[in-house]
Image (tube, rainbow, N blue to C red):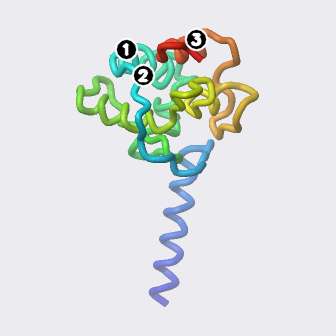
């Protein structure tokens, strides 16, 4: 009888956890970071501020309803969030983000292809279109662009 109660409780917790983020993108575990290390200052000042933690809550990957928060994220891209990240937290997030980059072909980076419309399926939906200002900001992170 007690094992039934435990199973019901665990199932309830699992279902409750899944309802917190309607856009589940389990995806594959990203490969470990390689040598792709574009400028961390550009990441902090532009990529984080304008793309990942966009001022538009509908486009933010990590706002209250975003699915890429470390605490409750639903994919392999899980990031530390907060109103004022420390340099250490930015570095930790940078390490996670670089796993989703393709420095040989930046335009093929899943950090770009998932949220851009019409490229890769993204559980969070299409966040911006090809040839948009957001894509330009992302491509500006790489010396030769995309």
Q: Which quarter of the image is occupied by the C terminus?
A: top right
Disc 3 crowd, CA 10 A, few/some/many (<14, 14-19, 20+):
few
Q: Left or right of 40: which side holds 86?
A: left
Pointers 1 and 2 in contact (C-beta within 8 Å): yes
Which badge, 2 or 3, is on the more N-terminal residue?
2
Q: Element type at marker 1?
A: helix
Determine whether 109 is above or below 33 in the image: above
- Viewer-side residue, 70 vs 96: 96
Disc 2 crowd, CA 10 A, few/some/many (<14, 14-19, 20+):
many
Q: Element type at marker 2?
A: helix
Residue picked out by circle 3 = 136
- Please state the horizontal and vertical placement of residue 142, each as a whole percent of the image: 49, 17
- Viewer-side residue, 25 vs 32: 32
Q: Element type at marker 3?
A: helix
Residue picked out by circle 1 = 45
- Please state the horizontal and vertical placement of residue 45, each as a whole percent of the image: 37, 14
Q: Left or right of 123: which side holds 91?
A: left
**Residue shown at 63% from the left, 36% from the top:** 124
Residue at the outermost right position: 118
**Residue shown at 51% from the left, 55% from the top:** 17
Give me the C-alpha separation between circle 1 and circle 3.
15 Å
Disc 1 crowd, CA 10 A, few/some/many (<14, 14-19, 20+):
few
Pointers 2 and 3 in contact (C-beta within 8 Å): no
Kindly tell me whether residue 58 is visible in this rendering: no
Residue at the outermost bottom position: 1
**Residue shown at 39% from the left, 15% from the top:** 42
Give me the C-alpha separation between circle 2 and circle 3.
14 Å
- Viewer-side residue, 97 vs 58: 97
Instruction: Specify the quadrant of the image occupied by residue 82.
Output: top left
Residue picked out by circle 2 = 48
Give me the C-alpha separation between circle 1 and circle 2.
6 Å
Q: Nearer the viewer, mark 1 or mark 3?
A: 3
């Amino acid at each position: 009888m007690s094992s039934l109660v435990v199973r019901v409780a665990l199932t309830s917790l699992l279902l409750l956890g899944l309802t917190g983020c309607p856009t589940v993108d389990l995806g594959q575990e990203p490969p470990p970071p390689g040598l792709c290390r574009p400028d961390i200052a550009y990441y902090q000042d532009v990529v984080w501020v304008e793309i990942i933690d966009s001022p538009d809550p509908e486009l933010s990957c990590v706002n209250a309803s975003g699915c890429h928060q470390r605490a409750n994220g639903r994919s392999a891209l899980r990031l530390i969030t907060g109103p004022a990240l420390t340099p250490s937290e930015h570095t930790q997030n940078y390490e996670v983000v670089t796993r989703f980059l393709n420095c040989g072909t930046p335009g093929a980076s899943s950090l770009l292809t998932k949220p851009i419309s019409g490229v890769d399926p993204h559980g969070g939906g299409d966040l911006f279109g090809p040839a948009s200002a957001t894509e330009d900001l992302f491509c500006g992170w790489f010396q030769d662009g995309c």
